[in-house]
Amino acid sequence: MSRLALVVVALLLAGCGPAGEPPDLASPVTAQRPTPANTEIDPDIDTGGSGDEDCGNPTASLRPTGLATPPGSTMAEIKRRGMLRVGVDQNTYLFGFRNPATGELEGFDIEIARAIADALFGDPDRVSFKAITSQQRIDVLRDGTVDVVVRTMTINCERRELIDFSSVYFVAGQRVLVTKRSGYTGLADLGGKRVCATTGSTSLGNIAAAASDPVPVAVDNWSDCLVLLQQGQIEAISTDDTILAGMAQQDPTTHVVGSRFTTEPYGVGIPQGDRDMVRYVNAVLRQVREDRWQAVYDRWIEPALGPGSPPQPTYRQVQR
Amino acid sequence: MPHPAGRGLRSVTRPAATTPGRLTLIAVGLIVLTTLAALTAWLAVRDRDHTLTELTERREPLAVAAQQVYRALSDADATAASAFLSTGGEPEELRVRYENDVAMAGSSLGRAASDPAASEAMAAQIDVIGRQLPVYTGLVETARANNRQGFPVGASYLREASALMRSEILPAAERLYRVDTARVAERQHDAGGFPALAAVVVAALLAALVATQLYLTRLTNRTLNIGLLVATVAIVLGVLWSTAAVTTQSALTGSGRRDGTEQVDLLVKARIAALKSRADETLTLVARGEGGGYEAEFARLTSRLAGEDGTGGWLAEVAADAEDETPLADQVAAAQHSAARWLRTHATVRELDEAGDYGDAVRLAIDADRPDGATAAFLALDDHLRAAIDAARQSFFDDTTNASRALTLLASGWIVLGVVAALGVGAGITQRLREYR
């Protein structure tokens, strides 16, 4: 009898012992961070910069001749159309951005564009703004989509081979924006770290060429860089101090550090060969420097960067 | 001493050597075969009925839930962009619409995920949506907060949110819908197939019954055996009934597919294309010149939706297959009309924007109070598409439910017929056996 009981117990216990692990339906996952459309980490960047030596002073433009718009000129064609088409930025605070309260574009560059329309039509609102990315600036001029580009565009020899520029209307310099808690003081601290700039900008080339060897990150718009910085996906943004100042105003936990390590003279981009238009825009800018440059600067830039004065234009000696 | 296995074998074979023994064996064999045939037929019919019930009660509603996830998400994306374009603060109705879309997406996702038979592919899509949707809403709220303060970084957050929606979440929702729809088609195919096993077994039974009667006629010179005749008639009745019922059911399942789910699928494709195009329309304006890609997609999608002027594309396909003067035909015609109106308005919006009248273009595109605006035309199109989907779903439901009804009595019918046939076989053979006493 007791033997039978033993057998029963043995049979019951045969199924006991380690049973493996319970099934786990909630296996751990890590968050995937989103990125702005067309973000590229460490893209191929041509840092060669051909033609830097041969064009002399790239900021030397054609001497203005006056505000006349003779028949057959580029200006007459624009007047016939009734609208000045301008390529601008709509995402760069203080220079070209959309005011959500009104839906209108505002900023320093926008006022320069309006000044040109004002001179042509006597009406600063006869402007058709096309928002473009940094990369599109030269293409839209070359394919005739716009008449001029006013979009924090640095005058340099490389671009001069493809388009023409007006005289200088603003001088900026490249610096670095970082979060205050990071403790970085300039590009030298950012070796191997991700630093953001827009695709096709001179700033991106400067980041790639920096001695400390940071990792460049390319995006479509400057604001996309700020998104990435706020999301902790990059360590710094490096571009013109004017643009950085606009970002620092949108996020008080960031600040601009280091000294200017480049000089960025801004000019109005004009399709190559429209020499009459270059002279005309230069005439408008000459007037702007005299009557409203200071007011526009004080309204947009002064609160962020302190006092400033209009840059003096240089013109070519030879009439080419 | 005889071998035990040999003795067992002889006990089975010995009765077969005599006629009464052979008759007993035939009776047992026939009764077993009858039971088998009735059971197989009963199982086949019940299986079909279950498939049809599963279609109407589970598979098709799940596909609709997946479609709702897509619709809600896509609408949320378009609405967020519209709200961004509105100046002077966000309009209440857009805010409410966006919030309802997100709530709807979450709730429909839960329902779509409640499928115990979800495949690996379905679970993977639900996983993507479930993980990324909270990220998306977070980005939209960040965009909103920045926008309120007048910071252009808000626009960048919105673009990032939209890129996430369009590159990750919506494709997952679309794949989920595709998988769910494929399952519906699979089930419809299952319910329309030929019940081969049951047919073979029943045919074998009929052959055996006929052969037995021929053998008995030869043995006794009597032409009729009432019991076996009753059994044969019962099985023939079952075959005729099954043929009629299964033919009816297959025809109804087929028309449920043609007039129902296939039309629903085309209409859902159309609705998804309309929603995507609407988001493209608003995002083109948000991008203000950087949006060439959105406008190209708008043209591509709307031409597949309704052709160049509302008379082509998927809508025309649905209209061609829809019977005249049905609710479906009416709704599709109305949808085509709205699509044509929307395309015309959209062309005007683009002309205004190209000509530099950005403010007018935005107002024409997003102002919901303008009867001639793009919003009104799009909402009418979406509404008609929704109603058309409901109408096509209804005909699927009606046809498939009727198909299921065609089978309702047949399953129990086979049990009754099986019992009758078995009794007939028993009685018929017993009668012959008595003659050998």
Image: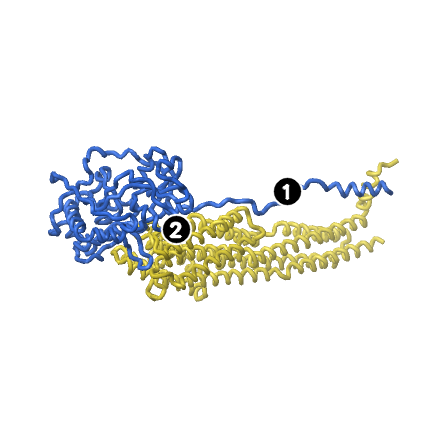
Residue at the far front in the pictured view: A307
Quadrant showing the N terminus of chain B: top right
Residue A216, image x, y percentages: 36, 38
Q: Which residue is mark 1?
A: A21
Q: Residue at x 79, y 55 (%)?
A: B430
Q: Position of residue B66 (x, y in %)?
A: 50, 54
Direction from residue A317 to residue B369 in the image, left or right: right
* Chain bearing mark 1: A
Residue B400 rendering spot, x and y as whole percentages: 55, 60
Badge 2 amino acid: Tyr
Residue B72 image point, x, y percent: 45, 57
Q: How many marks?
A: 2
**Is B205 left or right of B257, judged from the image as shown?**
right
Q: Residue at x 35, y 48 (%)?
A: A248
Q: Nearer the viewer, residue B53 or A141?
A: A141
Bin the neighbour count of mark 2 within 10 Å (Cα to Cα): few under 14, some 14-19, many 20 and up. many
Residue position for label 2: B157
Whether residue B359 is situated above or below residue A287 in the rendered picture: below
Q: Which chain is yellow?
A: B
Q: Using the image, determine if residue B35 lies above or below residue A4.
A: below
Question: Left or right: where does residue B63 sit relative to residue B50?
Answer: left
Letter of the chain shown blue in the rendering: A
Residue type marked 1: Glu
Question: Looking at the figure, which quarter contains the C terminus of chain B?
Answer: bottom right
